[in-house]
């Protein structure tokens, strides 16, 4: 672990070298620690200067994450907690019975309902609830995202070769050179208008592979207020990424 001083503060950071060609990326982890992703040929001194230059941004980002962590503590997966779906919050209700151990999560009457065998105890309860919730989200994403993608694809006049729903960390969507679209299943937690923005963004890449003015103009012709959706996603990206504590190991 490396360390630099900035005024009365100290910034610790870990260097991870990989296959990056020319650039350095700074990643602030959920615990507010700093990871520097760097090319193999970058010297430690060069990396240190980059970190030092970005220290004001790092400290601002760390403070934001600490506030988010304080306002949004990790889920315990107990009745009464709320979880988002398409931008709305739904309370969780856990039912205990002699059977239904393998029953899936259901959204009924404005609540997430999960039935568990009453003999299940301890960490097995929270683990099972979490697993069922994630399975439900993935299932809804696999239905909803392709459905919305096809609707907008007809509007744009360009069809993707394939639509894949994956766990992409903090990346919400991508378009390959072979016109395969990939979407992060967690985006199903965002408002429908934000989901549509992500879908249209990637569909536009079927036509324009870069982020030129032409790309943004094309996107804007379909979603005029895309900048608001983009801002919402940027402001809420952290919460969506770690809502179900799926990536706490990062």
Image (tube, grey):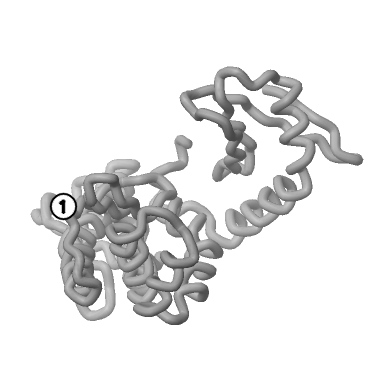
| Residue 26 visible from this viewpoint | yes
Left or right: where 232 falls relative to 88:
right
Residue at 30 percent across and 61 percent down: it is 207
**Disc 1, SS:** strand
Residue at 33 percent across and 75 percent down: it is 192
Residue at 74 percent across and 43 percent down: it is 54
Q: Nearer the viewer, residue 247 or 107?
A: 247
Which part of the image, by quadrant, shows the N terminus?
A: top right
Q: Position of residue 67 (x, y in %)?
A: 65, 58
Farthest residue in the left direction? Answer: 99
Residue highlighted by disc 1: 162
Left or right: where 203 falls relative to 69:
left
Farthest residue in the front direction? Answer: 214
Q: Nearer the viewer, residue 179 or 69?
A: 179
The answer to which image quadrant residue 33 occupies is top right
| Residue 96 visible from this viewpoint | no
Residue at 61 percent across and 39 percent down: it is 26
Q: Nearer the viewer, residue 242 or 56?
A: 56
The vertical placement of 178 against 84, above or below, is above
The answer to which image quadrant residue 99 occupies is bottom left
Q: Position of residue 64 (x, y in %)?
A: 66, 56
The answer to which image quadrant residue 186 occupies is bottom left
């Amino acid at each position: 672990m490396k360390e630099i001083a900035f005024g009365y503060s100290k910034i610790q950071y870990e260097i991870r070298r990989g296959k990056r060609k020319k650039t350095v990326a700074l990643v602030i982890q959920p615990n507010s620690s700093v990871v520097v992703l760097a090319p193999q040929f970058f010297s430690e001194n060069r990396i240190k200067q980059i970190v030092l230059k970005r220290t004001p941004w790092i400290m601002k980002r760390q403070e934001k994450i600490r506030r988010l962590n304080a306002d949004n503590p990790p889920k315990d997966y107990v009745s009464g907690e709320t979880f988002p779906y398409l931008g709305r919050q739904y309370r969780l209700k856990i039912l205990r019975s002699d059977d239904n151990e393998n029953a899936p999560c259901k959204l009924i009457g404005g609540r997430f309902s999960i039935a568990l065998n009453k003999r299940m105890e301890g960490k097995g309860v929270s683990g099972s609830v979490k697993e069922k919730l994630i399975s439900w989200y993935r299932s809804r994403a696999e239905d909803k995202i392709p459905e919305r993608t096809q609707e907008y694809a007809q509007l744009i006049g360009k069809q993707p070769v394939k639509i894949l729903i994956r766990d992409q960390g903090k990346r919400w969507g991508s378009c390959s050179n072979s016109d395969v679209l990939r979407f992060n299943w967690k985006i199903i937690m965002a408002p429908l208008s934000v989901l549509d923005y992500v879908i249209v963004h990637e569909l536009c890449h079927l036509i324009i592979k870069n982020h030129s003015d032409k790309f943004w103009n094309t996107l804007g012709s379909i979603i005029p207020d895309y900048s608001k959706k983009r801002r919402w996603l940027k402001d809420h990206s952290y919460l969506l990424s770690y809502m179900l504590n799926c990536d706490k190991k990062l």
